[in-house]
Image (spheres, rainbow, N blue to C red):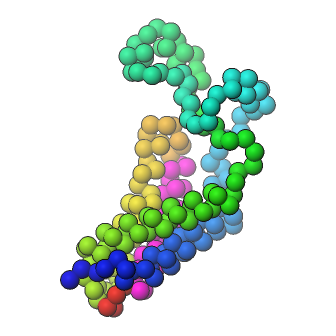
């Protein structure tokens, strides 16, 4: 007999709240992500140049290639050789809308925790032991919240130390979510 998702409403909500609190503590108290971003030595000049180009919001690559065939062109190869090579992410002007961003982060945890609950409901039976539930849910939650960050280091040049911190975050989120599920697993 499988577990119904409805019977997991408490660990889903509790796991969501605990992961969000852990995220807030990581970013506001521990602040180990403060070193994730580097300041350009000529920040004002770069901002002026980008502003003058008036690009749209989103991710911009430089040099930009629409098709991999362009990488065979001498002019493109020269741009890559001379650099800089990178990505610029442009957001709307103004201060970050923290309320909106926090709601999106909570929804991220809620949907992720719901997906973890779904997988756990298929794999674990009512009355499963605390450590069995903890181990399974922690693994599923780590895969949900962490593993997808690795390609950003592979393809976009994000420093591996930054990805390592995001994997640490995922491990923390996974542990608190697993604790919520293990503590409130039906039939235990």
Whether 88 is drawn above or below 140: the answer is: above
Q: Position of residue 18 (x, y in %)?
A: 54, 75
Extreme left residue here?
A: 1
Whether 65 is drawn above or below 56: the answer is: above
Most common secondary structure along the magenta stretch: helix
- Quadrant into which the N terminus falls: bottom left
Residue at image x 35%, y 77%?
Answer: 5
Residue at image x 48%, y 68%?
Answer: 110
Extreme right residue here?
A: 44
Write down the quadrant of residue 56 in the picture: top right
| Foreground residue among 137 and 160 | 137
Residue at image x 26%, y 73%?
Answer: 122
Q: Is residue 134 visible?
A: yes
- Quadrant into which the C terminus falls: bottom left
Whether 187 is drawn above or below 116: the answer is: below
Write down the quadrant of residue 98 in the picture: bottom right
Q: Is residue 172 magenta?
A: yes
Q: Position of residue 37 (x, y in %)?
A: 65, 44
Q: Which residues are magenta?
A: 161-184
Q: Position of residue 177 (x, y in %)?
A: 46, 74
Q: Is residue 54 left or right of residue 134?
A: right
Q: Is residue 141 left or right of residue 16?
A: left
Q: Is residue 157 left or right of residue 91?
A: left
Q: Is residue 151 magenta?
A: no
Q: How many marks?
A: 0
Residue at image x 45%, y 64%?
Answer: 111
């Amino acid at each position: 007999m499988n577990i119904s998702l409805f019977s997991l409403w408490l660990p889903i909500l509790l796991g969501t709240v605990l992961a969000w609190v852990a995220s807030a503590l990581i970013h506001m108290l521990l602040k180990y992500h403060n070193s994730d971003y580097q300041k350009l030595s000529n920040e004002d000049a770069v901002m002026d140049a980008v502003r003058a180009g008036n690009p749209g919001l989103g991710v911009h690559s430089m040099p930009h290639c629409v098709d991999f065939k362009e990488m065979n062109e001498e002019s493109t190869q020269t741009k890559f050789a001379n650099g800089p090579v990178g990505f610029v992410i442009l957001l709307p002007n103004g201060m970050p809308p923290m309320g909106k961003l926090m709601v999106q982060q909570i929804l991220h945890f809620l949907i992720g925790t719901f997906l973890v609950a779904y997988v756990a409901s298929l794999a674990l039976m009512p009355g499963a032991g605390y450590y069995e539930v903890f181990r399974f849910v922690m693994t599923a939650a780590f895969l949900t919240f962490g593993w997808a960050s690795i390609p950003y280091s592979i393809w976009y040049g994000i420093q591996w130390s930054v990805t390592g911190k995001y994997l640490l975050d995922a491990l923390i989120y996974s542990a608190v979510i697993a604790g919520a599920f293990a503590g409130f697993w039906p039939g235990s």
